[in-house]
Amino acid sequence: MYDVQTLGIPGALSSYIPETCARWGLDGFAVLGNDATISIARWSGLIPADIDSNGDGIADNWEATYFNRLDLDPASDSDSDGLTLFQEYLFGTSPLAYSPNPQQMSLSTNSVGKALRLVFPRRAGLPKVPYQFVTSPDLIQWSAATNISESLLATQSMDGVVFHTVAVTIPATNSAAEFLRWKWQP
Ligand SMILES: [Ca+2]
Ligand SMILES: [Ca+2]
């Protein structure tokens, strides 16, 4: 299979191969030269776990492993289970099969007032946390949740990937009703 995806050329090659470096299968690359004879090279090597060459918030190796391409829409829901691709990546669930929603939500009350508590698994080592929480009193006007506190409850490893169990506490406002949602922003 030959799937053209423009990727960053490895540093060792970039000085003398100025043309396209394209994905070729799951673990190989084709390098297209710029002289009269097209030179194609292929080598084998897994994409490092922490590379996100197109800045979409999802690591290349995850996209390649499940979809053999990198130009995914992180907001799409490939298996119609209600979790977006980005959430499946974040939570460590399969984007190809139904996944029970791993988010646990509860209401808590403390001396300050009521708060919404959200517990979920989160992939460790994200270069940045590409989401925020927004709240709304009416599902129309949304604004960034404030005074959020976050704590790590546990760390576990699954198929060689480290995940944290995270608890996020979001204080309730004085609105009669309040809605919460994740806003993805790579
Ligand atoms: Ca899904
Ligand atoms: Ca799924």
Image (tube, rainbow, N blue to C red):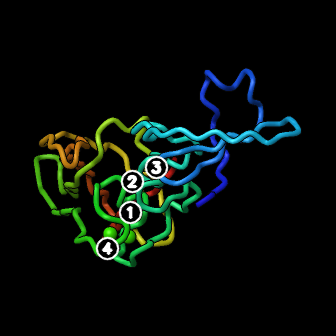
Do residues under tags 2 and 1 come within 8 Å of each other at their CB atoms? yes
Q: How many marks?
A: 4
Of pointers 1 and 4, the one earlier in the residue sequence: 4
Residue 115 visible in image:
no
Crowding at mark 4 (Cα within 10 Å: few <14, some 14-19, many 20+): few
In the orientation shown, which residue stands out farthest toward the front?
Answer: 37
Do residues under tags 2 and 3 come within 8 Å of each other at their CB atoms? no
Of pointers 1 and 3, the one earlier in the residue sequence: 3
In the rendered image, the quadrant that contains the N terminus is bottom right
Front in this rendered view, residue 30 or 53? 30
Which residue appears at 64% of the width and 39% of the height?
Answer: 41
Front in this rendered view, residue 12 or 71? 12
- Amino acid type of the residue tagged 1 in the rendering: Arg
Mark 3, residue position: 58
Residue 4 visible in image:
yes
The answer to whether the residue bearing label 3 lies less than 8 angstroms from the nearest atom of ligand 1 is: no
Which residue appears at 67% of the width and 54% of the height?
Answer: 4
Mark 1, residue position: 181
Q: Position of residue 57 (x, y in %)?
A: 48, 47
Q: Nearer the viewer, mark 4 or mark 2?
A: 4
Of pointers 4 and 3, the one earlier in the residue sequence: 3
Mark 4, residue position: 97
Q: Position of residue 171 (x, y in %)?
A: 26, 52
Q: Residues under labels 4 and 2: Cα distance?
A: 26 Å
